[in-house]
Image: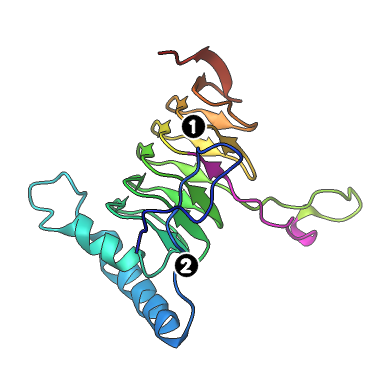
Amino acid sequence: MSTATPTFQSSEPCLTLASPRAPGLRSTVLFLVCNFLYYSIARHLPYSPRPYAFGARRIRYEICRHMFKSCGVDVNVEHGALINSGRDIEIGDRSGIGLDAFISGPLIIGRDVIMGPNCTFLSINRDTTLTSVPMIDQGFQAPRPPIIEDDVWLGANVIVLPGRRIGTGSIVAAGAVVASDVPEYSVVAGNPARVIKQREG
C-alpha cells in the first residue's frame, strides 16, 4: 500500500505518509469486513513480542491497512488498541500504534514513530461556550486531528489533545499531556508538557 513518494509533506520534509486507500465498492466492503475482523478477533490477539503471538502483528497489519485512510509498510498496531473505525487514521512506514492505545477520531502519524503503551489521542472536544446550557447539551467542536511528525518517540501513557502537532525527532516523556505544539527535536515532559531540552547532534 505504501509508495516510495509521499503524498503529503509539511513545509519541511518531516511528515511522510503513504498513498491513501483507493475509493470504490471493493474498498468499502474490505473496510467493513476488516472492522468486524479487527474488533472480533485481531484486537484480542497477543502482544507482538510474546513468544506465542504466532503472527499476531502481521494479522493486525493486514486488517488495519484496509481500515486506515492511508497505511505505510511495516506498521505495527498492538494488542488492545481502540482505533474506532480507523477511517480517518493516516500512518507512515515503520510506525506503531502502541499497546492499548485510544484514538478518538482523526489522527496523522508520520514514519518511524515509536509509541509506548496506553497512549491517548483526542481529536474532538466538547463545546462549553454557554454557561446557561448544560455542557452535555452543547455538543462537540469540529474534529482537529493531532499530528505526529516523523521519527517521534511517545512514552507510556502520553495524552495528546486535539489539534496538537509534535515536531520531527521529538521525545515525549511518559505521562506527559501535550496541550500545545512541540517544536522539532525537543524533549518534553509534564502536565502540561514543557520543553526540558533540545536534542542535538
- Decide which of tag 2 and tag 1 comes sooner along the chain: 2
Residue lying farthest to the front in this orientation: 5
Q: Which mark is residue 168?
A: 1
- Is residue 29 shown left or right of residue 121? left
Residue 26 figure quarter: bottom left
Judged from the image, the secondary structure of the residue bearing numbered disc 2 is loop
Q: Is the magenta stretch mostly helix, strand or loop?
A: loop
Graded by Cα atoms within 10 Å as few (under 14), some (14 to 19) or many (20 or more), the crowding at tag 2 reads many
Judged from the image, the secondary structure of the residue bearing numbered disc 1 is loop
Query: For the residues carrying marks 2 and 1, which lies nearer the camera in this image?
Result: 1
Classify 25 as above or below 56: below
In the picture of the structure, the residue carrying the numbered disc 2 is: 85
Q: At which x and y percent is residue 128? A: 80, 49
Q: Give the range drawn in magenta.
A: 136-149
Q: Residue flagged by tag 2: what amino acid is it?
A: Ser
Residue lying farthest to the bottom in this orientation: 25
Do tag 2 and tag 1 residues touch (Cβ < 8 Å)? no
The reply to whether the magenta stretch includes residue 143 is yes
- Is residue 190 shown left or right of residue 180? left
Q: Residue flagged by tag 1: what amino acid is it?
A: Thr
